[in-house]
Image (cartoon, helix red, strand yellow):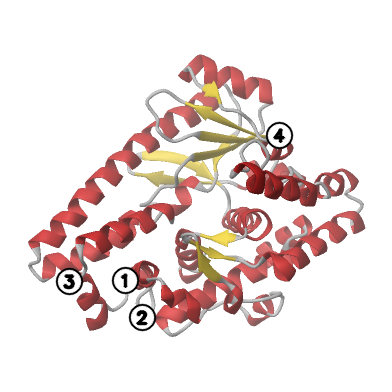
Amino acid sequence: MQSLLSNKSLDLLSRLLIMPGDNLAAGTITAELEQSVLQISKSDFDALVALADTNHVIVRALDVFRKITAKAGDAERTAWADDALTAERARIDNAVAHLFQITNAFTNRQYSVAVIKSLDHMPDLGSDLDLFTNASPGEVIQLMREEFHAIPDDRSWGDRLAGKWNFIVPGLPELVEIHVQRLGQTGEQFAIASSLIDRTRCITVGELIFRVPAVSDRLMISTLQRMYRHFYFRLCDVIDSAQLVEAGMVDYDDLYVAAKTAGIWEGMATYLAIVSDYVKRFRGTGLNIPQWVLKAARFDGREIFFAKDFLRVPILPQSAMLYGKQLAGTFRRRQIYSGARLSLLPWLATAALVGQKITGSDKGIW
């Protein structure tokens, strides 16, 4: 993990988000952090904001940044933060208002719907809006067209396997990504998908109410995305998950049963180990995760590295080993249909890699 410190923006961003103390960003602002903030150049600040944007932590990071500059009477750097925060909060307000209208439209038609991933980052927001529904594909497309004049975006092979559609909505810069009846990189996760709606809980964002996954399901969705599909973490994944642990919201027994049923328990434990190790790197102490959970991890935060704006998880042999365990477990439980879908993943990934090398893009495949 030492190599992570080679990136100046990553180091500062991490220190703004993870502070010494018992509560991440509510911890102690060190003299070293104050000095780094008060000496930052405009070009380095712009690089910091760009990395924060990619990692969905602009609001949380710049709130701390602004607190430091305002306390020091640094009007220039406070203004930089204010401008970036104003623009980002305006984007978030617009996206959340649209998201509420969309979920309301589903409810009004008596379709079950939950917001997945997008609201995990609040007060930040992701780069698209993600929903899960048990409605049929035809019902989803009809609703989005009739209610919002939305246009379905082109679907990749991966989108088709995963059972998801992206919609372009007028007045909304973000895509609306709707997962229909399936979850997982190849749509293999029927176990999670079949119970997700029944296990949801309600949260409020401002005065708006949204239905979101149970904490265990939320962590499993993050694990599927990071450990089994994209093989990288955003800083928001670390912060979001760490806050759930610190708030005592994780029922580890429920998480174990749910993740074991989904065939991703080792990946889930590894995900939590990586999160805890990253927090430890900047705070000095990791998260209070039961040892029996951490013992199930196949590797930890020492294996990750920073490249192309993200914290990368090695694919070989680490992630490939988790995939092999997932696939073998699926067939062992006689979930033949799920196993057949999951077995297509290496071919899909290979096609995406070839397409990337030939055309410079995996668009249309992954």
Q: CA distance from mark 1 to mark 3?
A: 19 Å
Please tell me which residue lies in front, 188 or 47.
Answer: 47
Point out the tag, 3 or 2, that comes first from the N-terminus: 2
- Please provide percent x and percent y for residue 262: 75, 55
Instruction: Tell me how far mark 1 sits from mark 4, CA to CA.
Output: 42 Å
Q: Secondary structure at mark 4?
A: helix
Proximity of marks 3 and 2: CB atoms separated by less than 8 Å: no
- Sequence-wise, the earlier of marks 1 and 4 is 1
Amino acid type, label 1: Ala
Check if mark 1's residue and mark 3's residue have beta carbons within 8 Å. no
The residue at which mark 4 appears reads as 160
Q: Which mark is residue 195?
A: none
x then y, percent, for residue 153: 56, 27
Q: Which residue is mark 3?
A: 38
Question: Disc 2 on helix, strand or loop?
Answer: loop
Quarter of the view holding residue 296: bottom right
Pointers 1 and 2 in contact (C-beta within 8 Å): yes
The C terminus - image quarter: top right
Q: Percent x, y for residue 122?
A: 39, 52
Q: Residue furthest bottom?
A: 284
Secondary element type, mark 1 = helix
Residue under label 2: 21
Kind of residue indicated by mark 3: Leu
Viewer-side label of 3, 2: 3
Q: Between residue 200 and residue 239, name the one nearer to us.
A: 239
Q: Marks 2 and 4, how far apart in space?
A: 45 Å
Q: Which residue is mark 1?
A: 26
